[in-house]
Image (cartoon, coloured by chain):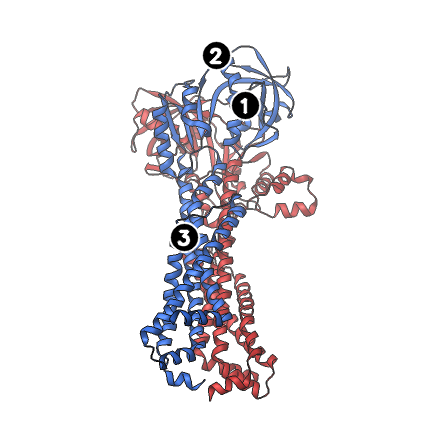
Chain colours: A red, B blue
């Protein structure tokens, strides 16, 4: 009997039910799409955040970093320390391999730079680097896709190159020349230059492009790592590795904990080391690569954290508003449903149905609509998140299967909540009054 | 007559009317919050990006080593927002131990503290610029075995004997600052014989790439012989992040507005159904289509204005709250939002009333009155 009345209600009130269905679906979509995006806004904005630079620098333990201002070297005169180039994959091949977005090994050597055949010489840094190089962490299998690549080009999406990026696999060694250095030496894409490192032999390089960064690179020559290693007589050596990692913003409390992870209690250590804080990623890199120090570049980590916090906060706000809007819409649509069916309710009551039965009937209807609307809404929300994310961030968001049951449960709760108001009216309806209207 | 009908109809339809009002209020509140946020988002986010430190460096246009600028001229041009720096080389040691080479940086501690909120200090900032208190890079301090509060001996490459320094704090940044010695600017100027000269000034300019380029041009004009270099990637990222957040909130607000419209539409439909008898009676007393439409539209317009006003108040409150939670500073309401939100509320109300209005115009007096 109950089920038949329920089925009947759906068969007759198609338009009304469609409105509630659409309201629930729209509400779920409006709430779940921003929630989906908010959950990993970091993935979405990784390209923009990368522009702040590497958030980790891997250097030999106890090494000093070069200090240069306007082409003048203010570095301390200390014995240079190097990393072994063959170990470089360890920065990615550790617990956090999926959070390392890109890395770039660097080798700096001071050199005398001159245009080929030119008389003028300038002292500048010759920097060996990876630009966009394929690498592989594990044995290639038939199923694995194209090799991922990494290097400066991946890390610095906003660098402007006039000409093109160097081809690292070509026969000739190609280089990028910083804009200011190029201007003072009269170098253009296609010209040749000679770089003489005091300790080693000269490197002959073809200028592939002119680089403008607004930073120290404007005064440098950037060449493939191996070319600089040969020129400087430092085969198999690196000065440091820049690492761009996807991190979770770190609170002050966790930052203090991260300073000395070995003093944490096992439980604290576990929660700290299983969260991608920038300090726990640094810790894992140091574990995977003995003899190095992974330094957190604080200004980058801070700026990233601030942007991420605010962005996900905004999205959460939008999601809450969407949820609120959905609850309202459902309430209004269900109220309209009760009013339209006054006669039917009156008839049921006059035939002896108790208030509880009629209310259960309406709640069951709401539940069916809630579940159906929630399913449709989470599908629409996933689609919406994809479209919005692709149009705004350029990367589609991955669909999370776990979010579907969550969204449906939310939709169900909202629908039942929205049904409470109209259901209270049922108890107040008097059969005699409404039936008189119908005659 | 129609005004009285109106008042009565508002009074009698308790719950349904409240839902309609809440729907339009909710929609307007979302619109008001988002619009207010949007207007302040740029300046607020820029403040957050400020944590990165400088985005513009003013140095001498002369490429030779040791070229300097006039401190007074630079300070006039950069005002409070910039930090002057003088660079030198020297050797530092703990007491009479073996000395280690280091870059020596003369800075204005107060200005650097403002410019670099991301610097982590063990110990504290030096209290007064006139003392011989210094900050030491953490990596350098570790090599020398100096703790905060310890003493260090500095010898400059340019000569002039040993300077005894008290190390007020150790600087951790993850970058080259960890290998530098920071001393008060006047001290380094005096000891290197470069009184009133600085090597460069670092500053933060709020806004996008355009504002930064404009500031660079102005500084080069104001400080003769200088060159201003924007840190381009930061400026570009700053702009891109702001654009994305803007578009994101805009798209989502549209969806929520659509939702509010749908909610209002179904509620108004309910209102019309509830009042079938009333409208039928009016018709039988000679009211034409125009009269019915006028009453329904008048009611909806009033509803839209009331909801819009409430929404504005709620939105201002929400924006304040969001400002506090997200940015640690309230976002003040803006007058320019008022007409926009009221306009949106009215347009949404009018669109939402179209279907219910059609239903109202279809009511036949005979059928509606039979029920009474």
B155 displayed left or right of A192: right
Give the x, y percent position of residue B10: 46, 69
Give the x, y percent position of residue A86: 51, 37
Crowd tier of the residue under label 3, counting other residues whose Cα lies within 10 Å: few below 14, some 14–19, many 20 or above: some
> Given the current orientation, which residue lies at the most extreme top position?
B160
Splitting the image into 4 quarters, where does residue A59 fall?
top right
Crowd tier of the residue under label 1, counting other residues whose Cα lies within 10 Å: few below 14, some 14–19, many 20 or above: many
- Contact between marks 1 and 2 (CB within 8 A): the answer is no
Of tags 2 and 3, which is closer to the observer?
3
2 or 3: tag closer to the N-terminus: 2
Which numbered tag is attached to residue B193? 2
Crowd tier of the residue under label 2, counting other residues whose Cα lies within 10 Å: few below 14, some 14–19, many 20 or above: few
3 or 1: tag closer to the N-terminus: 1
Give the x, y percent position of residue A167: 36, 39
Which quadrant, please, contains the N terminus of chain B? bottom left
* Helix, strand or loop under label 1: strand
| Chain ID at mark 2 | B
* Helix, strand or loop under label 3: helix
Front position in the image: A209 or B177:
B177
Which numbered tag is attached to residue B182? 1
User: Could you give the CA–CA distance between mark 3 and mark 1, rounded to whole angstroms?
Assistant: 52 Å
| Chain ID at mark 3 | B
Which numbered tag is attached to residue B338? 3
Could you tell me if residue B256 is visible in this image? no
1 or 2: tag closer to the N-terminus: 1
* Residue located at (45% from left, 67% from top): B263
Which quadrant, please, contains the C terminus of chain B? bottom left
* Helix, strand or loop under label 2: loop
Q: Are marks 2 and 3 on the same chain?
A: yes
């Amino acid at each position: 009997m109950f089920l038949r009345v329920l089925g009947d209600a759906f068969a007759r009130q198609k338009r009304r039910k469609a409105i509630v269905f659409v309201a629930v679906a729209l509400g779920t979509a409006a709430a779940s799409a921003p929630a989906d995006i908010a959950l990993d806004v970091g993935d979405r904005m990784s390209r923009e955040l990368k522009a702040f630079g590497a958030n980790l620098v891997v250097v030999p333990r106890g090494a000093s970093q070069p200090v240069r201002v306007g082409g003048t070297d203010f570095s301390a005169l200390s014995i240079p320390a190097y990393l072994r180039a063959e170990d470089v994959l360890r920065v990615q091949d550790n617990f956090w391999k999926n959070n390392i977005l890109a890395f770039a090994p660097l080798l700096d050597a001071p050199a005398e730079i001159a245009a080929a055949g030119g008389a003028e010489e300038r002292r500048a840094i010759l920097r060996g680097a990876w630009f966009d190089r394929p690498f592989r962490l594990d044995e290639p299998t038939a199923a694995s896709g194209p090799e991922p690549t990494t290097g400066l080009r991946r890390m610095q999406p906003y660098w402007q190159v006039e000409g093109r990026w160097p081809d690292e696999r070509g026969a000739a060694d190609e280089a990028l020349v910083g804009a200011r250095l190029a201007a003072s030496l009269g170098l253009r894409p296609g010209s040749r230059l000679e770089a003489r490192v005091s300790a080693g032999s000269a490197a002959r390089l073809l200028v592939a492009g002119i680089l403008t960064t607004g930073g120290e690179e404007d005064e440098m020559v950037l060449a493939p790592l191996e070319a600089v290693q040969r020129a400087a007589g430092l085969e198999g050596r690196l000065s440091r590795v820049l690492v761009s990692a996807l991190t979770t913003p770190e609170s002050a409390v966790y930052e203090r904990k991260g300073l000395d992870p070995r003093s944490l209690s096992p439980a604290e250590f576990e929660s700290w080391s299983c969260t991608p804080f920038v300090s726990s990623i640094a810790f894992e890199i140091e574990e995977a690569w003995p003899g190095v120090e992974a330094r957190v570049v604080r200004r980058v980590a801070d700026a990233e954290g601030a942007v991420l916090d605010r962005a996900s906060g905004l999205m959460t706000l939008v999601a809450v508003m969407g949820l609120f809007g959905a609850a309202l819409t459902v309430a209004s649509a269900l109220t309209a449903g009760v009013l339209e069916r006054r006669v039917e309710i009156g008839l049921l009551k006059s035939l002896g149905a108790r208030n509880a039965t009629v209310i259960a009937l309406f709640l069951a209807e709401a539940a069916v609509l809630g579940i159906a609307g929630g399913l449709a809404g989470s599908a629409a929300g996933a689609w919406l998140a994809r479209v919005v994310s692709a149009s705004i961030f350029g990367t589609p968001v991955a669909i999370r299967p776990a979010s579907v049951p969550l969204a449906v449960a939310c939709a169900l709760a909202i629908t039942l909540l929205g049904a409470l108001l109209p259901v209270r009216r049922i108890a107040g309806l008097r059969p005699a009054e409404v039936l008189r209207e119908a005659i | 007559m129609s005004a009285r009908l109106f008042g009565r109809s508002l009074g009698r339809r308790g719950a349904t009317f409240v839902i309609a009002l809440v729907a339009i209020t909710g929609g307007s509140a979302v619109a008001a919050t988002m619009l207010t946020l949007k207007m302040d988002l740029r300046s607020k986010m820029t403040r957050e990006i400020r944590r990165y430190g400088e985005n513009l460096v003013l140095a001498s246009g002369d490429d030779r080593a040791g070229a300097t600028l006039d401190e007074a001229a630079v300070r006039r041009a950069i005002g409070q927002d910039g930090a002057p720096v003088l660079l030198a080389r020297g050797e530092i040691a703990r007491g009479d131990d073996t000395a280690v080479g280091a870059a020596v940086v003369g800075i204005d501690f107060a200005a650097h503290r403002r410019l670099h909120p991301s610097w982590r200090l063990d110990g504290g900032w030096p209290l007064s610029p006139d003392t011989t208190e210094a900050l030491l890079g953490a990596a350098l301090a570790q090599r020398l075995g100096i703790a905060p509060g310890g003493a260090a001996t500095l010898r400059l490459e340019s000569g002039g004997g040993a300077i005894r320094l008290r190390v007020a704090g150790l600087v951790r940044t993850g970058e080259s600052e960890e290998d530098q010695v920071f001393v008060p600017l006047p001290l380094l100027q005096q000891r290197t014989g470069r009184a009133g000269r600085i090597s460069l000034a670092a500053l933060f300019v709020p806004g996008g790439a355009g504002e930064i380029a404009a500031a660079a041009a102005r500084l080069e004009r104001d400080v003769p012989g200088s060159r201003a270099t924007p840190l381009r990637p930061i400026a570009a990222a700053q702009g891109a992040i702001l654009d994305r957040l803007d578009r994101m909130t805009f798209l989502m607000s549209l969806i929520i507005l659509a939702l509010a419209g749908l909610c209002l539409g179904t509620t108004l439909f309910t209102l019309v159904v509830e009042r079938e008898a009333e409208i039928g009676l009016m018709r039988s007393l000679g009211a034409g289509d125009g009269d019915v439409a006028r009453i329904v539209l008048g009611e909806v317009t009033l509803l839209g204005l009331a909801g819009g006003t409430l929404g504005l108040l709620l939105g201002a409150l929400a924006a304040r709250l969001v400002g506090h939670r997200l940015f640690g500073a309230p976002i003040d309401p803006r007058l320019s939002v008022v007409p926009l939100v009221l306009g949106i509320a009215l347009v949404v109300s009018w669109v939402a009333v179209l279907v219910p209005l059609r239903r109202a115009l279809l009511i036949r007096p005979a059928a509606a009155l039979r029920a009474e």
